[in-house]
Each structure stands twice: as structure tokens, then as C-alpha cells.
Amino acid sequence: QSALTQPPSASGSPGQSVTISCTGTSSDIGGYNYVSWYQQYPGKAPKLMIFEVSKRPSGVPDRFSGSKSGNTASLTVSGLQAEDEADYYCSSYAGSNNVIFGGGTKLTVL
Amino acid sequence: EVQLVESGGGLVQPGGSLRLSCAASGFTFSSYSMNWVRQAPGKGLEWVSNIGSSSRTIYYADSVKGRFSISRDNAKNSLYLQMNSLRAEDTAVYYCARILGSTNWYFGYWGQGTLVTVSA
């Protein structure tokens, strides 16, 4: 299975909203509601931000939201804050007991 | 508090072997599926392997199938990854990751990672 496709970079000013896309196929994103998003700071472990397309784990601010349309999933960060500057990875179940990730998007807060 | 601590990484020659360990605490280890996820330097994340709570189910990414072996010891609250026939492309930080709840396909808790370098 190929990796999911994410833009390499995204940016926004404090207070603005930014949306990061994640494109797959009908065999992964389009076929299952097991899309998740992870935030990763340099040198640190990833942190789960969104699971099952749009659910937030306990402790994740509601500024983070997820959605899916067809074969494309999206992560929206509203009310951007400096601390949101990080790498973001999408992930999806891809059938046959396999999970795939996107290549990652570096979010810059201007 | 859930804690996952990996160990066992290091420098190994191509074709060599290495065994990674992950010590778990802060939760009932025997109740959760566990995973290994890796990240090559400067690259994205790659899921490696999953093992069910009682070891009855085991899954691997195609890239490591036949070379890597995942196992667990619930009495010792420990997860392992035996890596054989290592290649340069296996160079990565290897993370131990616990599922969030009952679904295998997203990872709610991560260790700090251990670096494996495959080089002559």
C-alpha cells in the first residue's frame, strides 16, 4: 500500500484557521472510518490528536477537528496558537490488518 | 499514568540482528494490543507490527514480514521486537505504541523511541 498524500507544509497566523488535507484511496480512507491524526514536535514522540475521523482523545483542545469526504480526510486547527507549530501526520486503516501513514505536514505559525 | 519505555537500540551491521524491548507500566498490559511504529531519520511514520493482548493475533507490514518477529510477556509487562536480516533501510527510531481503547488501528500512547542504525 502507498503512503497517504499530505502537503509538505502549511501555515497560518495566530488566531487563524488552517486545514491540512490527507488523500488516500477507496481502499484506505474511503473504505473505513479509522482515520487518525498525530502531532509531533521535533525529537519527540507523536501524540494522537484525532481518531475515527473526528473524535478527540481526552485532553486535546477542541480547536482541533477532523473530517472526511470520500478518499480525503482533513485536520482543521482553529484559533492557531504558537504551540501548534509542529509536524502533523494522518493515518488510516488500509485493510488486511495494515495501517498506513501520510508523509507529514509541517505546520508553521507565522 | 501510562508509561512505555523502549530499549535495545544501537548500531548493527547489515544482515545482523537486534532485539528491542518495551517496558510498560501504568495500565493493565495484558488487556491491550500493542504495536511497533518506526520513523526513519527526517522521514514519516511507518507502522511495523501489531500483537493482540494474548498474542493470538500478530500482524506485520510487508516491509518487515519474514524478518521481524513481535512478541510479548504479559507477566513481565513487556513487548519485544526481534529484528533479523537487518538492512540499511531499517534505520529508524522505533516506537512502542499502545492502542487507545479496543480498536487496533490508532495509537493513543507512545514511548520515547529507541534508535536503530544499520550500517557497516
Image: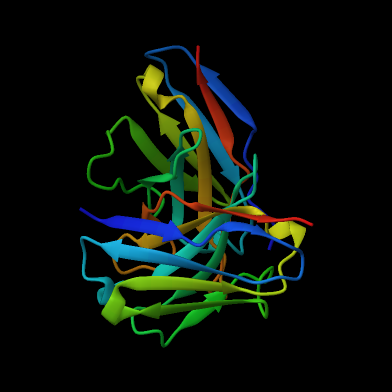
In-front residue for pair B79/A57: B79
Residue B21 picture location, percent across and down: 45, 67
Question: Does the rendering let one see residue B33?
Answer: no
Q: Is residue B7 above or below residue B15?
A: above
In-front residue for pair B76/B41: B76
Residue A75 picture location, percent across and down: 46, 37
Q: Which quarter of the figure is the N terminus of chain A placed in?
A: bottom right
Residue A95 picture location, percent across and down: 56, 71
Residue B119 picture location, percent across and down: 75, 55
Residue positioned 27% across, 33% down in the render: A61
Place residue A82 in its image quadrant: top left
Identify the colour scheme used. Answer: rainbow
Residue positioned 41% across, 88% down in the render: B56
Residue positioned 27% across, 71% down in the render: B29
In-front residue for pair A81/B49: B49
Question: Does the rendering let one see residue A81?
Answer: yes
Direction bottom: furthest residue: B56
Direction right: furthest residue: B120
In-front residue for pair A44/A54: A44
